[in-house]
Amino acid sequence: MPLIRPDLPPTSLLNTDGSPQFGVYRAPFPEVDLDRAKVPGWLGPLSLWRRKEWHHYAIVSPELFVTLAVVEARYLQTAWLQVVDRTTGERFEHKRQAPTLGLSLARSLWDEHTLLRSRGFFLDAHAHLESGEHRLKLSVAARGGLPPVRAELHLDARVEPLAVVLPVGRGRAMYSHKVPLPASGWVEVGDRKSALDPAHATAILDIHKAHYPRHTWWKWATFAGRAADGRRVAVNLTHNLNPREDQWTENAVWIEDRVYRLGPASFQVGRRGTPWQLHTDDGLDLSFTPAGERAENLRLGLVRSVFRQPYGSFSGVIPSPEGPLALWEGFGLCEDHDARW
């Protein structure tokens, strides 16, 4: 089955009547205007307070695997930083969670900042697509016996993203911008400073906004690596409450700087510490072997967030325009998430 390239996006992700322009696109939206979406029923006047947003970064290098996320749930703000030493297997996580953390999320990716100024946790992520780059500065203080972490990263944004607008319920939409970018700069953990070589380090961005229903679930996998022929590759797979997976999905493969659509994905979720199996009808056939896991079981009255997010290695075959590609190396994460919010 030949791979299909995503479409070019319209100028707005909304139609003139406020309804979403559902689709799968290979370039960023000039304006991300989900705030103006016309949400039907009683939710309409409260749509701002029901919208969930987050920015997630996964940095994959030969020495380190770093995940960083900032989440705005309206009633709760969350930030976490996970650092995995791939040479030793050691892992730790800094986390902050409160009704407010001084978090401000960029409204677009063209020339705006995502800022977090919480005690002992500072982030400035400057998205600057006009100049073809993103820059990220991070400083997290030592806490509870965990080492401090500092980082300055430069991300080469001249890679086609996957930008999607998908249905998640009657009149409700989610927007996501996902892209793997060559990363340079440095990460300092305690007194150990690691340089990032863009030939071998990748930062996977996941920018997300959605008017989710109260009960939301998804399975997710993302990784970066190399095919056996030496080309840089990355994959994103999701199975969620989108009722139109036969037409639109978040599933894609990147080969060098170009993105290709994939069809619906199936996940065979392994028990803790055991492999997962991932498949699509396009020819993707992967095994994921966990090396460790972060997890959450948050229950705050009517609010619940339960997830497993193992990280580890991917192996198998991915599709390409020329035919199946053997995966030489791939490292990233999977997630099984169920939420009521």
Image (tube, grey):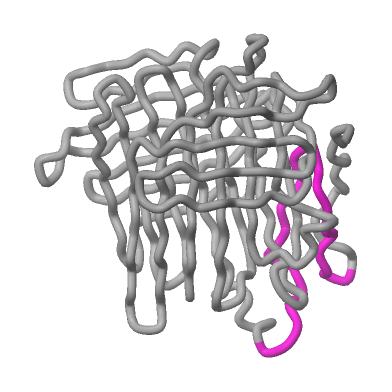
Instruction: Indicate whether residue 30 is drawn in magenta.
Output: yes
Residue 142 rendering spot, x and y as whole percentages: 16, 38
Direction from residue 279 to residue 199 in the image, left or right:
left
Residue displayed at 44% across by 36% down: 289
**Where are the magenta residues, as a range?**
17-42
Instruction: Indicate whether residue 176 is drawn in magenta.
Output: no
Q: Quadrant of residue 211?
A: bottom right
Above or below, 21 against 243 in this view is: above
Residue displayed at 24% across by 39% down: 92
Q: Quadrant of residue 83?
A: top left
Residue 127 rendering spot, x and y as whole percentages: 58, 36
Q: Nearer the viewer, residue 73 or 276?
A: 276
Q: Nearer the viewer, residue 97 or 330?
A: 330
Residue 145 rendering spot, x and y as whole percentages: 10, 41
Above or below, 47 against 52 in this view is: below
Number of numbered markers: 0
Extreme residue in the left direction: 145
Q: Nearer the viewer, residue 279 or 206?
A: 279
Above or below, 230 against 314 in this view is: above
Residue displayed at 88% across by 71% down: 17
Q: Nearer the viewer, residue 109 or 264?
A: 264
Residue displayed at 69% across by 23% down: 158
In which quadrant of the rendered image does the N terminus lie? top right
Q: Main secondary structure of the magenta part?
A: loop
Direction from residue 115 to residue 224 in the image, left or right:
right
Residue 247 rendering spot, x and y as whole percentages: 85, 56
Direction from residue 182 to residue 5 in the image, left or right:
right
